[in-house]
Image (cartoon, rainbow, N blue to C red):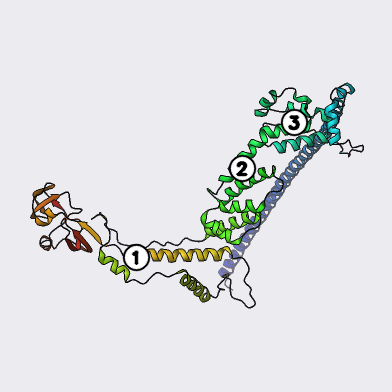
Amino acid sequence: MNPNSKLLLDEVHCLFNEQKTQIEDRLAEADRKLDSRFIDSSRLLEKRFADIDESITKRLADVDDSLNKRLTEDDRVSGVMKVASALESWSQDSEGAMDDLKLKPNPEVSLFHGEAYDVHTRNHPHDPNPPNLGKLPKQKFPIYEGETTCLWISQAEDYFNMYEVPPFQWVKISRMNFCGAAGRWIESIPQPNRLPWPDFCKMLHNRFGRDQRDKLVRQMFHINQISTVTDYVDRFSSLFDQLKAYQPNPDMHYFTTHFVDGLRDDIRMVVTLQRPSTLDTAYSLALLQEEVAASTPKTDTTRMGFRPQHKLALAQPRLPGANKVMGDKAPAKGQDDKLSTLRAYRRARGLYEVCAEKSVRGHKCVATVSPQAMQEAWDFFNIESASEDTDEPDEQLLLALSYDARMGSHGQCTIRFYGTVHGLSVVMLIDSGSSSSFLAASIADQLPQLARVPMEASAKIANGQILSCTSAILDCQFSL
């Protein structure tokens, strides 16, 4: 080998060794730095985790303390509530005992009111073994203002029997709870405390019950449906319940019929055909019919026709020729034809003719007709009637034209002017005896730019002659 080449290779080998050494040193330094970083990061994380654990532990301890405090407070509150309920129960018992002591009959007072006590004893003998009602809650005595007399008497008697009040004190206790009209009335009664309870109740009925009953009867005579069925049912049932207090066994057929008669016409017809036997049945049928009628769309039976914007003439009686035209028309269909048409309509839809139910094998028509079928028949007849009314031909217009306007002469109620009609010079006659504005056919032919509307009309002049008119000009402008 050439010595120079050998030297060159040795130098290259030395350079490689140096580079390798430097790279190894750098890698070792990088490993050392990474290790130190990882160690520092792990220390920081451990410290942070320790702090978090400490804070969480502290928070949990605080939560436990607060829960323990709340539980302690709840226990205290429950204890206070128990004590309060016990005190309330003791208070009710003590009040009941005091009331019993207050209401205990005095022998002297019993002798003084012996007559009233004997009357009640004969009517209501004393029960030697009264029922044990237990500890009754304290109830207030009902207030009487002159209304609902029967209800107040029953409530007062229940109160007296429940608390075992002696009969001779019934009127006295009742008098303390009178106010309003009843309070003013009791002042006019001399010594009401000595009255027996039956006589006292009879006086109440004569003073307040009779007038109230007459008032309720008058309201029942005039009640009817003025808004919805629900409102009518509420008002009728309220009156019925109040009247029932004066008549324990009312005639249900009378009240049911009276309720049905007060319904609206379209609802009353359907409910009457169902023949309800009780008020509850009538209430349900009326509410159901109102719901069905509200959900059924109304059919517009009006026919749209030509209506001029401006009134051209006053309507007059028909001409003799119009009666002939009407006489040639076939007579209107009768009720039998309408029923036949309705039956054919139901057969075409696959329904039974009577009940309008779907046709199935073994079907039997019920005795009563459903509200839907009645509504369908009612709408059908309304449509037929409206069609018959709108099929009448329009009456021919009969206008009025004065004799002076026809002949061009002067009269007491005419004024002649010179004017123009759309630029055409004409002679105009203002006449109070004519019903509309008339234009000669020769003048109208000179104004082809004006639109004409076909219209059959007749003009009757003063001498009885009738002139025919075949068209009308709308928006005809003229100036004097």
Residue 99 against residue 32 in the figure, above or below: above
Picture residue at 56% right of the left edge, 64% below the top: 372
The amino acid marked with disc number 3 is Phe
Of mark 1 and mark 3, the one earlier in the sequence is 3
The amino acid marked with disc number 1 is Glu
Of mark 3 and mark 2, the one earlier in the sequence is 3
**What whole-number distance in Å separates the C-alpha atoms at marks 1 and 3?**
74 Å
Q: Position of residue 106 (x, y in %)?
A: 88, 23
Q: Position of residue 356 (x, y in %)?
A: 56, 70
Crowd around label 3: few <14 · some 14–19 · many ≥20 (10 Å): some
Q: Position of residue 179 (x, y in %)?
A: 68, 27
In the rendered view, does 217 fall on the left or right side of 421?
Answer: right
Cβ–Cβ under 8 Å for marks 3 and 2: no
Crowd around label 2: few <14 · some 14–19 · many ≥20 (10 Å): some
Quarter where residue 213 is shown: top right
In the rendered view, does 223 fall on the left or right side of 334?
Answer: right
Q: Which numbered circle lies on residue 326?
A: none
Point out the residue furthest to the bottom here: 361
- Reading the image, the residue beneath label 3 is 200
Q: Which numbered circle lies on residue 217?
A: 2
Q: Which numbered circle lies on residue 392?
A: 1
Residue 78 against residue 324 in the figure, above or below: above
Residue 140 shows up from this direction: no
**What whole-number distance in Å separates the C-alpha atoms at marks 2 and 1?**
49 Å
Residue 433 against residue 55 in the figure, above or below: below
Quarter where residue 154 is shown: top right
Q: How many numbered marks does the figure carry?
A: 3
The amino acid marked with disc number 2 is Val
Quarter of the figure that contains the N terminus: bottom right
Secondary structure state at the residue bearing disc 1? loop
Picture residue at 39% right of the left edge, 66% below the top: 388
Q: Nearer the viewer, mark 2 or mark 1?
A: 2
